[in-house]
Image (tube, rainbow, N blue to C red):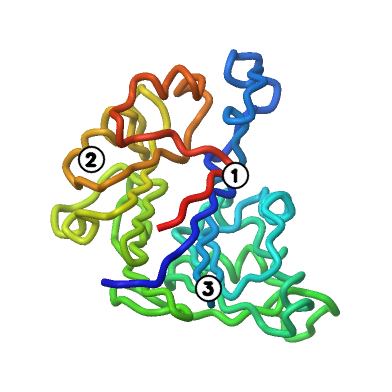
Amino acid sequence: MSSPSIKITFLGTGTSQGIPVIACTCKVCRSTNYKDVRLRSSVLVESTNTSLVIDTGPDFRQQLLTAKTKRLHAVLFTHEHKDHIAGLDEVRAFNFLQKMRMPVYATEQVQTAIRREFAYIFSEEKYPGIPEIDLYTFDKESFSIGDLPILPIDVMHHHMPVKAFRIGSFSYITDANFISDSEKEKLKNSTVLVVNALRREEHVSHFTLQQALKLIEELNPRKAYLTHISHQLGLHDEVSKELPPHVELAFDGLQLII
């Protein structure tokens, strides 16, 4: 699958609580290194003609302001957990600036949650100024958003189906702890692979650091980045020293050109 040259901006690389965690006094949460400050996970994908975001968590407004985002053509969702959808209301700014309804791409399962969590968007009597969105359904088949080719990939988050995505040679996996062999084939030989690595200890619904590294070795990307990181993983600089040369911890604000 080919795609135009794209820029990736990591808007957030933290887990559901972010870092620092409220009231936590661990060394990671007290760190003064900006790479240890992590908002909820989200990435901005931009080509010359198209700008889309994968997931809109509770920090979405802050993330867009920090990234100085001036255009957004679509929202693409991995799954319906609150730390991935809670900021959807913020697309109102682009409704106004771009004079357009925001296309939102989601599975039927995610759309059910969006209709429940944002019922006011779909009310027959609409309050002035609410977000204007159009829902587009996808499942297993590839599709395009503007000039960006999107290949959905099925992964599991404990018992919850979640979508990973391959956009050209960029692959993005968040909130997963199992991928079938057939779906792994779709991820192999990416130029850049992003995968969640929550912590070192076993977790019921996320890859651990060692599990993520094993997956990276199997999928053989040119470069890999770890995301959806909790304070339990450790300090950014200390963990980085343990990683293979082609693997790095992502951090908020990191930008890549692919």
For the residue marked with disc 1, what is the amino acid? Gly
Residue of label 2: 215
Q: Residues within 10 Å of mark 3 (few under 14, many from 20)?
A: few
| Tag nearer the camera, 1 or 3 | 3
Examine the rendered structure and indicate whether residue 110 appears above or below residue 245. Answer: below
Pick whichever of labels 2 and 3 is earlier in the sequence: 3
Q: Nearer the viewer, residue 63 or 116?
A: 63
Q: Quadrant of residue 102?
A: bottom right
Q: Which mark is residue 191?
A: none
| Residue ID for mark 3 | 48
Do the numbered discs 1 and 2 sit on residues whose CB atoms are within 8 Å?
Answer: no
Question: Nearer the N terminus, badge 1 or badge 3?
Answer: 3
Which x, y percent locates residue 245? 30, 30
* Mark 1 and mark 2: Cα distance apart in space: 25 Å
- Which residue is located at x 53 percent, y 25 percent? 231
- Where residue 158 sits: x, y (%)? 33, 44
Task: Name the amino acid type tagged 3.
Answer: Thr
Q: Secondary structure at mark 3?
A: loop
Q: Three-letter amino acid code at disc 2?
A: Leu
* Residue on which the image places disc 1: 253
Q: Is 232 above or below relative to 122?
A: above
**Quarter the N terminus occupies:** bottom left
Q: Is residue 114 left or right of residue 61?
A: left
Q: Picture coordinates of residue 254 (x, y %)?
A: 54, 44
In-image side of 190 versus 64 (left or right) = left
Rendered residue at 26%/47% (across/down):
222
The residue mark sitting in front, 2 or 3, is 3
